[in-house]
Amino acid sequence: MSDHEMEVDDLPKDKGKQKEAPEENFKDDTLPWVEKYRPVTLSDVVSHQDITSTIERFIEKNRLPHLLFYGPPGTGKTSTIVAVARRIYGNDYKKQILELNASDDRGIEVVREQIKQFAETRTLFNKGFKLIILDEADMMTQAAQAALRRVIEQYTRNVRFCIICNYVNKITPAIQSRCTRFRFSPLPIPEVEKRVNMVIESEKVNITPEGKQALLKLSKGDMRRALNVLQASHAAYDRIDESEIYTCTGNPHPSDIEHLVNSMMSDDFGTSYQLVMKMKTERGLALQDLLSGAYEYFETLEFPPAARVHLLDKLATIEHWLSTGGTEKIQLSALMGAVKTAVEITTYFSPPSRLQLEPHAMNIDNIRAAVTGSGGFYNLKALIKGIRACKTLADERALIQKESAAIRTSFKEEDSFARHNNIAKLLYIHMLGYPAHFGQIECLKLVASPRFSDKRLGYLGIMLLLDENQEVLMLVTNSLKNDMNHSNMYAVGLALCTFANIAGEEMSRDLCNEVEKLLGSSNTYIRKKAALCALRIVRRVPELLDHFIDGAKGLLTDRNHGVLLSGVTLVSEMCYSPEHDVSGITDPFLQIKILRLLRQIGKNDPRASEAMNDILAQVATNTDSTKNVGNSILYETVLTVLEIEADSGLRVMAINILGKFLSNRDNNIRYVALNTLNKVVTMDTNAVQRHRNIILDCLRDGDISIRRRALELSYALINESNVRVLTRELLAFLEVADNEFKLGMTTQISLAAERFAPNKRWHIDTVLRVLKLAGNYVREEVLSSFIRLVCHTPELQAYTTSKLYTALKEDISQESLTLATVWLLGEFGEALIQGGLVDEETPKPIQDSDIVEIQESILQSPYANALIRQFVLTSLAKLSSRPAVSEPQRQRIFNILNGFATSTELEIQQRAVEFASLFSHADIRGGVLEVMPPPEIKATVIGTVSERRSVGSTRTDKDSLLDLMGDETTPAAAAPPAQSNTDLLADLFGGGGAAPAPAAPAPQKNSIQDILGLFDSTPAATATPPPAPMPTTNGGGLGGLFDSTPSPAPAAPAPKPVTPTSAPAQAPVQNRPTFLAYDKNGLKVTLAPQVLPSKPGMVQIQARFEATSGPVQGVTFQVAVPRTQQLQMLPMSSADVNPGNVETQVLKILAPPGSQVKLRIRIAFTGSAGAIQDQVDFAGFPASMTNGVL
């Protein structure tokens, strides 16, 4: 294909490339359906997605070349270019195009006059090009094509040509070389069917499935032909069937063709000739149509190669003479002669042992037998020998297929002897596992035979090939009834045996009286078999049990052992009462109630739990897990085992049952298993770890709820030993996960890497992979933690910066990836310039201009939001102070900063102005923009995200806080906080904040800071009051924030000010009950709750700290609440507790009304006994507290 692209002018601005012309054709019912349902947009074009996508890219890039569309008619060529015109010109597309059909105007005058005149003019009010569509171009003369080539060359700036033809070889090479060629192949039948279905539904066409299949077959991938035929048929007939389609199109019906060909092959010449002439006259068919239909029918038959070659050669010759005007009668005779000759050749090439055809036996069945070479084996013994002689399975399958075809053919002869022989062979084929259903009716014919041998084989075939759900079984009922009354007891026995094996509900009702009568037979052989038939009836239709009560009593007094055995079996079935049985499980409802009772009895009772351990083990072992009822009992058993004080072995067995549930096909069972494992993973992590692989498989489940639970469980399974494997699986899932999962996944993967990373290199690679896969779904805390890690790892700073730089060049759409890369380039870009890109083998050099260029491209990209632009400006400013950056690049950075000095965003404008001003202060610029000291390392925050489960299940008791409400922030204290050494803004501009007073004690973190803090500029709240409080109580903290000098220390200690966000040292509380939460190691902690009846669910608790045996210093008080509750902690009044003083801290809890407030408290301090760290659970508050009542 020649792809010749040409530069084009800009498309019309006022039209817009995205505007589509409205489709008015859908409102006009007078149009042909081809025009009415012609595609409007490129996306509507059926099939040819590769062509439409290529043209779409041409349009998007404004580089549309001259086009050459070629291919069979009705494949979408014209529809595609019309859709392109609509895409380019919008509503005015008809004014911008010239559409000609060369089959009407094919001379050189058209090119010189119409086309040239249209091409010479340009659009008046906009820049752009016009479009000339030249359809049926292969009908143009050579002179016209030569003139067209010159016009194409001369007026390329004004117009684009789309040349459409059926045969590309009729287009001159000169024109082909100047166009981009696209071949339109016939449309796939499924694509045609979709469009036809849409038209049928829109036009309310009454068409049968057979009619639609005939329409699709005749269309041969031509959409135009399919819609035209459908519209014509709809106009002519109210209901369209297969025959109406063929009648409307004038094509011969396939059944007519089959009839004609069979006559040509089997009848004499005169008969066949008269039949063909009669059908031509009645149907109004041409010999050309019959010839095409006969060819398609011959393709379905198998001929020897010599016969096929002869037949195809003659068909081609006849078609040639018909196309040149030959006489139809003579060519019809030639066609019949060719078919007769092919039959003779087939007979000649067939093996004599397989085919002995006499002239009178020359019929279609014998011919097909000769063609396939299928004569069949003589009897069952010969077939068995033939199958055993096969050396491979393929040989056996081929032999079975050939023999099955021979048996099918033989069934048509209605030969009773052959039928018996064939059924015997067919049953053997069925026993080998091959299909034999086509022999069911023949078995019924054998049953109706008077010969005992035929009955025996027929009943055997019925028992093997049929079951009680087959509709064919209704035909057997009459034969069974007749044979049950047969004079031969063995014939009766055959009927009874068959009934006992295949009888369904309907047959049991029909033959119940016959079986009841035979129970009283004097023949013990018949009574024995009748008892088994009665057993079948009782099982299938229990309400018919009364018919056999008297007969069963008589069977129990019989002296024949066989009759007694059958009678006892029948009576046992009649006495069985399955009132409480559900799918073979005895009263599952009672079992579940008992298990729930055991759960209540054994809870917190080791003695009772030990007594029921064996019972629970037996239930878990003996219950059938293949049925849903059994699974419900097993699930209740698991819940009971996990709730009581069971031994470790029983717990492991319960967890294994849940793991087995994960392999069940039922989504509900898998869901409850994952949900339960999430709750018990902290009880026995090792037992749950055994099912890690199947839990990871659930991440690929189609059910989103199962994927969610599996994801939560995967987080809990991560520990030091499997962090590499599980993180790799989670990263693979992150790549294909839904967007709603990505925020939680990035946080949890980063936390797992931070907690269990085997080394820092692996930790950095993992977070880098997260940033590349889901950079738009990474929380700020994760990004901050990653930057802290890099700052504290000098040996990996160059490696990390190189990897991030390489990743950013590939994709700048991930926000967190962009932020991290820009930050590191500003800090460590000099190492990248000096050492180059760190690779596995050798470093690759990189220029300072490359780093500046990629940051400039970020600023110009559509992904650059305000935060990214702030980061980039700061990074460029810091990069400009590095010695490795050349002077031209510094000037380039200065120009970039100056460009943002007039930004409408205040923050960006301020940064740009201040950074640009630093260029005129070379003496301080280096100090202001030097590399920042590594920030303080803190734990990454877990906030409220879509996945709330904490990472890891191997944490120690002192780490196992429940859920610390990461999305709640602690209000800052009003008092001026101590200046942090990690104040990024202060470091950036070289000061402006005051140095801390030398006598100020080290700040103590409160619970929120300790767990949820980031390396932000200032802590969210300070735990220690400032050493020099301001004299005012309101606004003092904010005033001191911008002071240039520190406040002088007072001569005498002043009382602590009361701030809006910190509790006073001793706040009086009236009428509040007090609860003792902790009294150990010289420290006593009491809790005083306060509620408002008007606001149920809101609780404020004041924690009081008292020293009982000496001073206590450095008190850290941390609290966690259940997931359904939210907690906010205000700063502690003082971290040091002296005897006689009471320090306080306020807790605010929001809980659902009526729920129990439970606290898990972790406290650390230094007392007379040394450093103490302890953890306690407190649940002593009344349940009515969340209802506003104490």
Image (cartoon, rainbow, N blue to C red):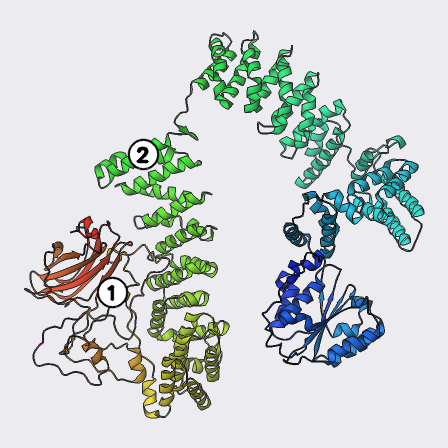
Residue at the extreme left: 1140
Q: Secondary structure at mark 1?
A: helix
Q: Is residue 327 visible?
A: yes
Q: Is residue 840 visible?
A: no
Task: State the extent of the magenta-drawn residues as a range.
Answer: 1042-1059
Q: Secondary structure at mark 2?
A: helix
Q: Is residue 60 left or right of residue 139?
A: left
| Residue at the spot 83% in from the left edge and 70% down from the top edge | 106
Q: Earlier in the sequence, mark 1 or mark 2?
A: 2
In the picture, the disc for residue 442 is: none
Q: Position of residue 669 (x, y in %)?
A: 41, 43
Q: Which of 43 and 831 lies nearest the eye of the viewer?
A: 43
User: Pointer 1: what residue?
Assistant: 1008
Q: Quadrant of residue 124?
A: bottom right
Q: Quadrant of residue 277?
A: top right
User: Pointer 2: what residue?
Assistant: 593
Above or below, 203 against 415 in this view is below
Amino acid type, label 1: Ile
Amino acid type, label 2: Lys
Above or below, 438 against 740 in this view is above
Give the CA distance from mark 1 to mark 2: 45 Å
Above or below, 194 against 407 in this view is below
Q: Is residue 774 left or right of residue 1151?
A: right
Report the magenta stretch's main SS: loop
Q: Is residue 343 left or right of residue 671?
A: right
